[in-house]
Amino acid sequence: MTDLYLARHAEALPDESGLTDRGRDQAARLGQRLKEIPFTTIHHSPLPRAVQTARLLNHQAPLQASEEAGDHIPYVPLRNELPTDSADYYLDFLHQATPEELAQGPHIAERAVARFTGPSTSNHELLITHNFLIAWLVRDALDAPPWRWLTLNHSNCGLTVIRYTPNRPAALLMFNDESHLPAGIPS
């Protein structure tokens, strides 16, 4: 059995070059919450906001950057896959990305599913990543239609846990839990 812990990076500066003061506090609080979990490795996106979040956890597990943990658009639905009343909204949002990003994202997401999901030799894995990949992995665990990743939002340093057990469907144990963060301040 493997529990995959997923956390979105902490709050980033407007230029995404690092974390805000609040983001550094979020990362420290997430690290405090996770300090007793014996992670084998902490996988993280290579982008500065995720790298800094992973470092600020102050965990003993080694850090490992991974392109598969990056900020990519995992799936671009066709109009007829989407609810009629929201199709324009979602398609307009997705087409803000470059054609290269739209073409490469699904391939990277497929590699992320292969790399990070399913039972493994480790009982506890941590992935510091981005909203889109967390949404994609949750959607995958629930066997939801591919376009549903668009409807899942994750807070900065919110915690999600998916359990993978041999010969059983994946189980979503926790989604976007923020109990380690100060109450009343949306992230």
Image (cartoon, grey):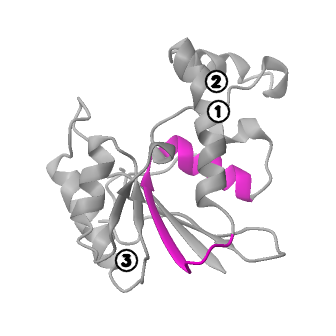
The label shown at residue 34 is 3
Amino acid on which disc 3 is placed: Leu
Find numbered disc 1 in the image and state the secondary structure of the residue it sits on.
helix
**22 relative to 33 in the view: left or right:** left
- Residue interval drawn in magenta: 119-141
Residue nearest the viewer, comparing 43 with 149:
43
Crowding around mark 1 (Cα neighbors within 10 Å: few <14, some 14 to 19, many 20+) is some
Dividing the picture into quarters, in which one does residue 47 lie? Answer: top left
Closer to the observer: label 3 or label 1? 1
Q: Are marks 1 and 2 in contact (CB under 8 Å)?
A: no
Find numbered disc 2 in the image and state the secondary structure of the residue it sits on.
helix
**67 relative to 76 in the view: left or right:** left
In the rendered image, the vertical position of residue 41 relative to residue 50, given as above or below: below
Q: CA distance from mark 1 to mark 2?
A: 16 Å
Amino acid on which disc 1 is placed: Pro
In the rendered image, the vertical position of residue 38 relative to residue 65, given as above or below: below
Quadrant of the image containing the N terminus: bottom right
The label shown at residue 106 is 1
The residue identified by callout 2 is 90
Q: Most extreme residue toward the left, as rendered? A: 21
Q: Give coordinates of residue 137: x percent, y percent.
A: 63, 52
Closer to the observer: label 1 or label 2? 1
Residue nearest the viewer, comparing 131 with 180:
131
Crowding around mark 2 (Cα neighbors within 10 Å: few <14, some 14 to 19, many 20+) is some
Q: Earlier in the sequence, mark 1 or mark 2?
A: 2
Dividing the picture into quarters, in which one does residue 171 lie? Answer: bottom right
Q: CA distance from mark 3 to mark 1?
A: 30 Å
Q: Earlier in the sequence, mark 3 or mark 1?
A: 3
Residue drawn 24% across the image and 31% down it: 14
Q: Most extreme residue toward the front, as rendered? A: 121
